[in-house]
Image: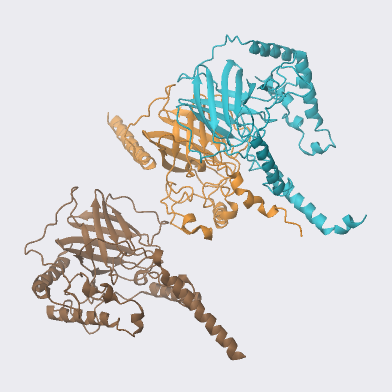
Amino acid sequence: MMGNRFLSRVTVVAIVAWVAVAMTLVTAQTPGYKAPRAPDGKPNLNGIWQAINTANWDIEAHSAAPSPVLELGAAGAVPGGLGVVEGGPLPYRPEALAKRNENRANRLKLDPEVKCYLPGVPRASYMGFPFQIIQSQKHVMLVHEYAGAVRTVYMTDQVEAPADSWMGWSNGRWEGESLVVDTKGFNDLSWFDRAGNFHSDALHVVERFTARSADTLNYEVTVEDPKVFTRPWKMSMPLYRRVEPNAQILEFRCVEFVEDLLYGHLRKQPSQ
Amino acid sequence: MEGIRGTRASRSLAALVIVAVASVTLAAQAPTYKVPRTPDGQPDLQGFWSNATYTPLERPDSVTKEFYTPAEAAAAEKAAAARENAETEPGTVADVHYDFTQFGLDRSQATLARTLRTSLIVDPKNGKLPPVTAEGKRILAARAEEAKRLGGRWDSAQSNQLDDRCIIMAGPGPPMMDAAYNSNYHIVQAPGYVMILTEMIHDVRIIPLDGRPQPPESVRQWMGVSRGRWEGDTLVVVTTNFNGKNPLRGSTENMTVTERLRRVAEDTIEYNFTIDDKSMWERPWSVEAVMRQTAGPLFEHACHEGNRGLYNTLVGARLEDRKAADAPSKTDSK
Amino acid sequence: MNSRSLVSVGAVVLGVAVLSANIAGQAPAPAAKAAPAAKPPAAKAYTPPKTPDGQPDLQGFWTNSTYVPFERPQGVTKEFYTPDEAEAAIKAAAAREAEQTEPGTAADVHYDFSQFGLDRSQSKFAYSLRTSLVVDPPDGKVPPVNAQGQKRAAERAAARKLAGGPYDAVQNMAIGSRCIIMGGSGPPMMNAGYNANYQIVQSPGYVMILTEMIHDVRVIPLDNRAQPPQDVRQWIGLSRGRWEGNTLVVETTNFNGKNAFRGASENMKVTERFTRVADDVIDYKFTIEDPATWDRAWTADAPLARTEGPIFEFACHETNYGIANILAGARAEEKQKAERAKKGSN
């Protein structure tokens, strides 16, 4: 009997500790909230969602800072942010940290967002543009306004990534109320934010989308990349539903907007 | 589904006949197929589809009838495939481009959305685009002027083609047209929405079905803005608010596209569309086409991200300019 | 609050009580209207009213305008003046203030404070018998800057020298002139010289302090949330508050070090204590801790007196012609000098 009581106390302590950890990891939610069901009985995550934070500027905690472009003045300046990465600074390997700092110092030239390149994962989720979840039984589509980026989450007929890509290859499953998306097959060309935080082609991202109220989701992301970081790390944030009537994803077809930036110096000069 | 991508047209006459019979049945209009439903009750159009085709938009000048016989269709297809493969003869200019057949990208290796039609256009009855209006002629002339002002194809990124600039290709439309290769689509439905993903260039149309109004006039998009509704088993999609920068055969920003999609077999979607653009054509014109089920998945087409071609051709063109500028005496000598 | 500080609050309050009759109706500055002072409190201990959510009510319009110098003047050794001595000190200060605007003086090129009603004698001020705002150390002076602080000060001076003259670039000019932030915001909140006004508004879980110049707002959460990450730094730092009885205790850290308060480092910690001791007086104390600058903490006592609202928008930057004009003038002077030099060498 003694042994059982000891065991159960340890278990209780462990559960309480786990809950405490879990509660710090997810934003506070209506306890036990469950989203309405989609027609196939799964939680219905359909809708247009958007993050409201400064993660796209810098996923770590940061102060406000001037714009890297003089002419933009305050319109291009960086707002401060308390950070979305859990547990402090990113656990970079020393040589990777040096590369991150070099990225940051040259971000106008190097940030793929400036060139209208596909944003990668999880950056696409918090770019400051909305995205729409289109949820069917076989596929959950994440359709992003920014650069028309799109992610196909395969819920059935799952295979390994056949080739590397910017947005990775996603396989998904339901775990209770959470949509769990497991993504690999990234190239090493996208960044996590405008502050130079980056990854290699060994990147492995696991996302959890869980409804926390009728119009918000908890979005939790575990990032693993042994070539760049010394251990996996987590970020989390709420995603807010765009509730205005007739909300829709519009085009942000930005290739056209960057052509002079990329190719302007190759314009034919008027002949003498 | 394994054999669909790897079949060569020249080896599959038997298959062609079977398909041709099915196409004729289509034309005869007596569907016994009952389209399955999505969990929320929409007719199910979901899956991977191809609209790759050798059928031209307009009827060739030498042809007067509306339908080929199966044998004529096969011959026309063979001829078109031969022309496509001929481009990649080693030593030809076209071959400097990559060898389509080597990468399985030519249409003969794709899932063909076959039809016995001699043209995709069914109205006007002559299978050709209607006459252009006076305003249309003015617009075309203005466009030509603008193109002249922009200069030669390699003078700048902006004077080049939209597909080489990786801005938009023929696939998404609307209307959705054969993209020459990778002409693939993925349709996914959710309550209140039909989503169509076009492989090149990962364009997505999210079509709401809730009867919402069209957006304000000042919102203009390359793919316009679409609104959909079900009429029985047919998805009717009306698209307006084009920005006019990707003119379909000369269309303007005032074009209205009405598409009708109906699944008529497990592996076939009937895809018809009408183009109404009074600024360009005297009357609307219509197309009847099909989309065939194909094997997924679609792959990411990161066109812009990998666009070395545009950069390299511009660099090359500027080098040639400098060479020409540095050697004027050569052109002086007579 | 410990008993010692209670006594000193009592002394201030008492001083106010004794003087209320004398001050009312008097003109403490030449040609100025009577300067309203803090009303005397009731004889018994004061219990502040509560907001609807149960916080002691600090709400309203307040000023920390004062004639009390920050540090005790040379030659003064006691902690409190007699009422007459305080009166004389105020009169002398007001006269000096008015003097500045004598036509023909350099200071008069600036606008005439008294004409716009901006001088202290025409505004409400927080009356006090103290000889200094600094109450600890007991000598009424800020402790000496330690070696680390001196080193930092020397580095700052060297950097300033490298940067050139005061009008070589906008970044060389005073932070207040640049309309970035002024002394009233703090923390700690210091007398701004004019428009030394604040508005306090409370709502469940928050105390908000609006400083008139330059419309700075501190929104102080009361929910015991964690300290902010080290990498987030602000001009006004980041504040966390809690109620201890009727005293609002606010701790502020995460300064960015660009507006070094009396030479402090970015690791300065400010602890403020707000206690409403009368309808129209808030006892405001602050303690400064910064081992990188001072070897000991030090404290000042600078009460807030109720004043009239409303607070006006202070759109400093939006109409900051001063900077453009001063810099243009400096550039014009350089050009003139250069041209004269050229002529001279011919």
Q: Is residue A171 visible?
A: no
Which residue is at the front of the view, B297 or A39? Answer: A39
- Name the spot of residue B97 as percent of width and height, x first: 77, 38
Q: Is residue A118 above or below residue C287?
A: above
Q: Residue furthest left?
A: C43
Left or right: where A59 falls relative to C87: right
Left or right: where A186 falls relative to C214: right
- Name the spot of residue C41 as percent of width and height, x first: 10, 65
Q: Is residue C18 visible?
A: yes
User: Which shade of the palette goes to chain B?
Assistant: cyan
Count of numbered marks: 0
User: Which shade of the palette goes to chain C?
Assistant: brown
Q: Is residue C148 above or below residue C339?
A: above
- Name the spot of residue B249 as percent of width and height, x first: 67, 33
Left or right: where A145 falls relative to C34: right
Among the chains, which one is orange? Answer: A
Residue at the image point whose x is 77% and y is 14% from the top: B71
